[in-house]
Amino acid sequence: MLRIVIVAFWGVMAASFILPAHHLRADSLSDAYLLPELFDIMAEEGRMAALSDPAVSQNAAGRVGWESAINRIYDADRMHDDFITALTAALRPATRADALRFAQSDLGRRVLQLEVSARRALLSEEIDASARIALTAAREAPDGSPRADALARARERIAVNDLIELNVSLGLNTSLAYYTGMVDAGWMAGMAGADLLTLVWAQEQAIRDDVTDWAESYFLLAYQPLSPEDMQSYIDYAASPKGDAFNRAMFRAFDSVFVDISRRVGAAMAAHMQQDTL
């Protein structure tokens, strides 16, 4: 039900100035990392996925009820605020300050805008398809070619923060929450916890393949304008202790938000299917 959560926000080279304490508020971090824009995109991704679910009834009354439920669940402002609450609890002051210094650096601002712009562009089915074609071409390109080198840098960027494993874990957690929401709402009668775990774990390879394809195509698209030198600086910071700590804090916050959303979508789907059988 949920588009994978690729977290792509951490530093390059921290600026050399120290920010006053009042500039380290969560809302400053949110603005610097373009989080309102990101959650607008993620909410739209979620709505698109949920509304295209083939399990949803196609009769007019059922469709209207489902759309209403999904629009309430994928409220971008609420998602953003819940995320900021969770992120604030997960971040140490030094990690927060370092992340904010990056975001306010020249390269940081450029990287963050590229990431958000690419994410928004991938809402288009045509651009998403083009990005995947470009990924296939890069995978088939000879070693040492510009396409192969760009893919190698994207893969290094993914590897330094263990983004595939973190996203697979998040995908499994949200899938379990979805089915748990359905069971708690009275659907899938007789399914116990162990049954749900078996059902979810059977999806692991499919989630891993989807995460890998999406991450590589996304990073190839997002970082096209960056020079190899700028990309390497970005990778070096992401691999640093503070860069990695920020990445993991972001994932803990995303997990909190999207597990709750998945559970609510599962409950809404159960209610929709129960209504449809009446």
Image (cartoon, grey):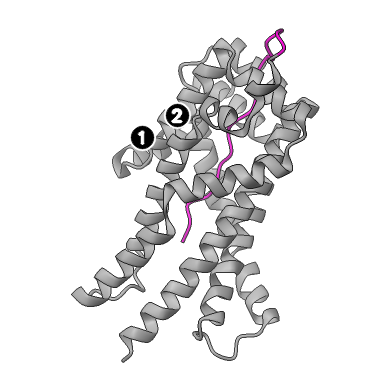
User: Would you say residue 7 sits in the magenta stretch?
Assistant: yes
5 sits left or right of 137 in the view? right
x, y percentage for residue 7?
A: 58, 39
> Residue 262: in sight, yes or no?
yes
Q: Nearer the viewer, residue 173 or 195?
A: 173
48 sits left or right of 198 in the view? left
> Where 3 falls versus 266 (above or below)?
above
- Circles 1 and 2: CB atoms closer than 8 Å: yes
Badge 2: residue crowd in 10 Å (few <14, some 14–19, many ≥20): many
The residue at which mark 1 appears reads as 121
Q: Nearer the viewer, residue 214 or 243?
A: 243
Farthest residue toward the left? 60
Farthest residue toward the right? 241
> Residue 142: in sight, yes or no?
no
Query: Residue flagged by tag 2: what amino acid is it?
Result: Leu
Q: Which residues are magenta?
A: 1-18
Badge 2 marks a residue whose secondary structure is: helix
